[in-house]
Each structure stands twice: as C-alpha cells, then as structure tokens.
C-alpha cells in the first residue's frame, strides 16, 4: 500500500484504487480552497498512471459532503467580495469538476450521509455515486443568495426528471437517499453501511475484468452523448473503438473467453469465471 496524507485530504493507493477521503471537519468536510487544491493535485498525480483502475471519493465523519466553504476564504470579509471574486469562485468549481469528469478511469463518489451545494455538485461529476437510504441531498443556494453554479443546475437538470430538478434547485428542497436514487441523482442507495461497502467491493472487483482502454474510451463516448448530437456521438464511437481495439486488450479478453475464463486486466492474466 502506498500512502500519503495532506492537511485536508487523506489519500492512499491500494490494489490499483486511489482512495480520497476528506479530512477537514473544521469545514464540515466541505469544499474549501485547500480542499479544491488538494483534490485537484491528487487527481492530477494519477491522470497518466495506467495502473490506477478507479478513484473513490469519500468524506470523513458521518460521510456528509458539505458545500463551497471557499466562498468565505476569498476575502477577509464577505462584504469585500466583488465580481472578480464571484467569477473566480465559479471557475474553481468548474475546473475541479472538469478534472473529475475527464479522468480516464471511473470515479466513484461515496456520500454515506449525503451532500449539499458545492460538495454535491462535484460528486455529480462521478461516474458512480452511492449513498445510504437515510442520506440527505440538497441545493440550498437559492435560500442563501447563490446559484448552484458549480455545475449543479446543468447536472441535476440532465440526471433527474426536469420537474424534480426544478423543485430541488428553485426551492432548495432536500431529498433522501432513496429519493435521490429513484430520481437518478445517485446511482444507488443502500439500507446499511455493510450493504453499501459490499456493493462497492463488487464494483471494484468487476472493474478488474474490464479493459482499461475500453473503459476510458467508453467514458469518452458517454461524454459525447451527454454533451452533443447523435452524429457527434457516433463519430466519437468510431474513434473510441479504433483506439480501444488498437490497445490489444480485445485479444486478451477473447482469448480468455475461448478458454472459459475471464481476463483480469489488473493482474494481467486470465482467471476462472468464479473469481468474479
């Protein structure tokens, strides 16, 4: 196990997984300037490390991700904030959000207790997002004189039924983990921590049997579907299939299949199917 630690973000790499755990209770595990910087640096450090198969983002304490604490740190007094500060704040969130989404490996968000505001907005950039049934999620910005401008208005409106997104964003309504899963804001909600951890373990195991090149290029295709037209998406598929097959991973996968096995891309060998 390789382990490093920063003031606000604990991180360690184990079995090809980068675990990032927020360690800033003084900010209620929210997105302070230091947290934005630490998380950005951690993600940048593994961007080209092909041995990293996934990133897991979690929070300490009860597992609740608070909002954009950075707003209180840009100037000595809130009254001193000006238009340049407002725009700087938004750009900071956008930059980290794009960085999360652009990683070649899956990013898994864990919000055991839920999330709000900027903390939720950045978790929505994850490829998978899991929580407990009793978690709470909200965009309280409108009640505080802000807009959910770290991608919240755009991501929620795409992930959820539009009417549900309107209610959350325009009223600052809070929803449960069960509702978040029902509406599509999160990938799945679980009754107990044990069930959540078991599912996460299964997801990470399944990723071992997925070609890194195929995962990377499938993520790019999904991004094209999210952002553009069908023609743009089909063009991205042409590029993706060419690049994924050119990696040679399909020879490993099909070779294992022909022998009644599956290929473990992390271990670099074919294994019996029952190991999945």
Image (cartoon, helix red, strand yellow):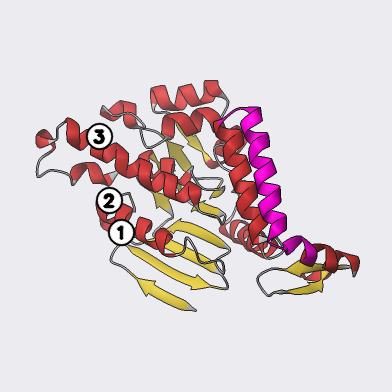
Camera sees residue 187: no
Residue 169 lies in the magenta stretch? no
Asked whether the beta carbons under mark 2 and mark 1 sit within 8 Å of each other, the answer is yes
Camera sees residue 171: yes
Query: In the image, residue 261 lies at what x, y percent?
Result: 85, 69
Residue at 56% across, 42% down: 186
Disc 3 secondary structure class: helix
Disc 2 secondary structure class: loop
User: Which of label 2 and label 3 is nearer to you?
Assistant: 3
**Tag count in the figure?**
3
Instruction: State the image quarter where residue 148 is shown.
Output: top left
Relative to 103, say whether 125 is above or below: above
Asked whether the beta carbons under mark 1 and mark 3 sit within 8 Å of each other, the answer is no
Residue at 54% across, 54% down: 108
Q: Earlier in the sequence, mark 2 or mark 1?
A: 1
Residue segment shown in magenta: 228-251
Quadrant the C terminus occupies:
bottom right
Query: In the image, residue 242 lies at what x, y percent?
Result: 70, 50
Name the disc covering residue 32, or none.
Answer: 2
Residue at 49% across, 65% down: 18
Q: Which residue is denoted by mark 1 in the rendering?
A: 24
For the residues marked 2 and 3, what is the alpha-carbon distance in whole angstroms?
Answer: 16 Å
Q: Earlier in the sequence, mark 1 or mark 3?
A: 1
């Amino acid at each position: 196990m390789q382990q490093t630690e920063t003031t606000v973000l604990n991180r360690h790499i184990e079995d090809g997984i980068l675990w990032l755990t927020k360690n800033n209770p003084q900010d209620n595990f929210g997105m302070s300037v230091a947290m934005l910087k630490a998380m950005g640096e951690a993600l940048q450090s593994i961007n080209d490390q092909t041995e990293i198969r996934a990133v897991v983002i979690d929070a300490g304490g009860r597992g609740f991700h608070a909002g954009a604490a950075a707003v209180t740190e840009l100037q000595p007094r809130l009254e001193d904030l000006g238009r340049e500060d407002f725009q700087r704040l938004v750009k900071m969130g956008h930059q980290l959000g794009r960085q999360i989404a652009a990683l070649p490996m899956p990013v898994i968000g864990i919000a055991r207790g839920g999330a709000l505001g900027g903390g939720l907005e950045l978790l929505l950039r994850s490829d998978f997002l899991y929580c407990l049934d009793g978690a709470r999620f909200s965009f309280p910005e409108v009640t505080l004189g802000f807009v959910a401008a770290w991608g919240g208005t755009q991501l929620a409106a795409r992930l959820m039924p539009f009417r549900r997104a309107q209610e959350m964003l325009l009223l600052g309504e809070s929803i449960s983990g069960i509702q978040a899963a029902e509406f599509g804001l999160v990938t799945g909600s679980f009754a107990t921590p044990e069930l959540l951890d078991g599912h996460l373990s299964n997801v990470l195991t399944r990723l071992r049997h997925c070609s890194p090149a195929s995962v990377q290029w499938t993520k790019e295709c999904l991004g094209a579907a999210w952002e553009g037209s069908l023609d743009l998406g089909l063009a991205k598929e042409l590029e993706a299939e060419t690049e994924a097959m050119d990696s040679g991973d399909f020879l490993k996968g099909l070779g294992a299949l022909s022998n009644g096995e599956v290929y473990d891309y992390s271990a670099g060998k074919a294994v019996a199917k029952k190991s999945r």
